[in-house]
Image (cartoon, helix red, strand yellow):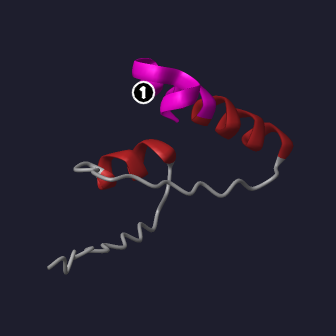
């Protein structure tokens, strides 16, 4: 997303998701939202805003075994 929106990615993402949800609600076509983030402290708040009832969080820890 950095290449698409630069430092203004927050508002750009908000507009994209809001318009997608609006169109989905008027066409009665379901939308699946998949989010990837290196850090997201407010996953539950984001899920509430998106209207997601079930939140699945997968934590992957990468360990470097460098010698």
Q: How many marks?
A: 1
Secondary structure that dominates the magenta span: helix
Residue 48 position (above or below residue 34) = above
**Residue ID at (31%, 74%):** 60
**Residue ID at (41%, 52%):** 47
Instruction: Give the side of residue 3 with respect to residue 27, left or right.
Output: left
**Residue ID at (41%, 66%):** 55
- Residue 4 colored in magenta in the image: yes
Q: What's the magenta region?
A: 1-16
- Image spot of residue 2 (x, y percent): 48, 31
Label 1, secondary structure: give it: helix
The answer to whether residue 64 is seen in the rendering is yes
The residue that label 1 is drawn on is 10
Instruction: Give the side of residue 47 with respect to residue 64, left or right.
Output: right
Instruction: Give the side of residue 5 with respect to residue 49, left or right.
Output: right
State the image quarter where residue 32 is shown.
bottom right
């Amino acid at each position: 997303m950095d290449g698409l929106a630069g430092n203004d990615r927050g508002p750009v993402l908000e507009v994209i998701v809001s318009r997608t949800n609006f169109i989905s609600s008027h066409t009665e076509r379901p939308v699946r939202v998949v989010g990837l983030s290196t850090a997201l402290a407010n996953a539950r708040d984001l899920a509430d805003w998106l209207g997601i009832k079930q939140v699945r969080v997968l934590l992957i820890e990468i360990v470097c075994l460098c010698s």
